[in-house]
Image: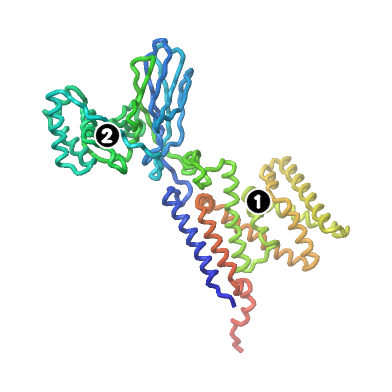
Amino acid sequence: MASRTPFYILVSILFLAGTALTLHRHIAFDIPWFPGEQRQTWSIEAKVDFEANGDPVTATLAIPNTQPGFTQLNQQTASPGYGLSFLERNGVHYAEWSIREATGSQSLYYKVDMLVDPFAIPPKLEPPTTTKPNVEKEPYASAAKMILDRATERSSSNYTLARELIYEINNQQQTAELLAQIKPKNIWITELLRDAGVPVRRIHALSLEDGRRRQPLIEYIQVYDGNEYEIFNPATGEQGQPKDLLLWQYHSSPLLEVVGATNAQVTFSMISQEQPFNIALNQKFADNDWLNFSLYTLPLEEQAIFKGILLIPVGVLIVVLMRILVGIKTSGTFMPVLIAMAFIQTSLLTGLIGFLLIVGVGLMIRSYLSYLNLLLVARISAVIIMVIGMIAIFSIVAYKFGLTEGMKITFFPMIILAWTIERMSILWEEEGAKEVMIQGGGSLLVAILAYLAMNLDWVRHLTFNFMGIQLILMSLTLVAGSYTGYRLLELKRFKPLTKVDNS
């Protein structure tokens, strides 16, 4: 007798691989275990105002992209009469408006939706370039050098130097007031770090707060330490990016440039909202490359198809368990799965009534065809045509009586119904009506159980979002298929042995 070890190894590999893929999907992509969970998104609107004087106008606004903690979902603008282009230059993203002639106050709107996403995959940023040291006149040069020297003595890396330099400028009041006479504090911090050979740039960020209007950007300093970036608040020296801080402009480029107009400014409004995770993931993966194997990368029509297809293994497992472990007889091996799929489309009650009507009438017509001594192919073809006719008649009658649910009977697989009628008719002739009732009733019972399992929101959610579930179902099917013991319905044969003879 062959060893069962390879079989158990195969089943174990399938089960462990499916479990690992499922856990990876949950952990790496933040896919929830249960349906109905929400994901937070921020809708942020930038309003650009300026005064045009009748000349051609070009307005360029730096816009955000996917970044740590946030994934860009979509963007749109409102700019009647203006031409619009979304541009990218050296990794910097812009929205550029243009018009041949404009006069008076002008307002342009840019809106972006950002998904709060701890698993966001931002594009790689180029490190800021270092520039030549600035040469300042006295006494500013000596004051700046003194602050830089003190910070350097107490630092050991680019990050610690930035933190100590911010501390020195914020706490050396007299020196800071002297330097502030010619440049703002943030510019001094950036230039002194560059003088020390530290790649650094000034960036602008937006503090997210639900329902806020006309909010300005906050300036931060971004320091590069060879491998990664770190953000520093120049006002406090705090290191790290706060949870609700969205980086808007982070490429050392101007935030807003307007040519042909004056008094240009930009303000921001924002609102937080919750949306179902599947909608958020559809938008997140809409433009991903071919390396992403998520079903959310497919068009919505194909996604809807797969939502049904991926339920079939669940129904197959139900059939395997009912036939092998319980011992229920069915008409056809996996016909109950197809009936269950039809029930999902029609609803259980409508599907049951439609199935019984078609099969019942079909058996009566098939009994007449048996007297004609037709060949199998012609007989099956006649049954198929008969089934199509009955479905059409039932649909018309249901519509005439206002029973719109009855029109869903068209979702039944016609070929399967024809074969079911043919098989049951032959079974009736060979085994009798009792066997037809047993197998037909067993098919309906298994189909109902499969429908109840496949129609659960939790099951539909798991099978669509976790492809590893398919491997787990396959391993369970193989284990059930290796069972060779007694079925539950067969145990009734041994019931007399349990009786005790009291005589």
Q: CA distance from mark 2 to mark 1?
A: 61 Å
Q: Residue furthest right?
A: 372
The image quarter in which residue 223 lies: top left
Residue 397, how many percent across, how many down?
Answer: 75, 43
Q: Upstream in the sequence, badge 2 or badge 1?
A: 2
Residue 307, how many percent across, how many down?
Answer: 57, 48
Asked whether 124 or 111 is in front, the reply is 124
Q: Secondary structure at mark 1?
A: helix
Give the vertical position of 385 relative to 116 (above or below).
below
Residue 421, how many percent across, how many down?
Answer: 76, 57
Decide: few, some or many residues near mark 2? Use Cα within 10 Å; few <14, some 14-19, many ≥20.
many
Q: Which residue is painted at 13% across and 37% down in the image?
A: 150
| Disc 2 target residue | 221
Q: Secondary structure at mark 2?
A: strand
| Disc 1 target residue | 342
Proximity of marks 2 and 1: CB atoms separated by less than 8 Å: no
The total of numbered circles placed on residues is 2
Asked whether 449 or 137 is in front, the reply is 137
Quadrant the N terminus occupies? bottom right
Left or right relative to 425: residue 101:
left
Kindly identify the amino acid type of the residue bearing the numbered disc 2: Ile
Decide: few, some or many residues near mark 1? Use Cα within 10 Å; few <14, some 14-19, many ≥20.
many
Kindly identify the amino acid type of the residue bearing the numbered disc 1: Ala
Asked whether 480 or 175 is in front, the reply is 175
Q: Which residue is painted at 61% across and 89% down in the image?
A: 503
Q: Which residue is painted at 43% across and 34% down in the image?
A: 113
The image quarter in which residue 420 lies: bottom right
Give the vertical position of 453 relative to 164 (above or below).
below
Colour basis: rainbow
Q: Residue furthest top?
A: 54
Asked whether 259 or 54 is in front, the reply is 259
Residue 168, how many percent across, how many down?
Answer: 15, 35
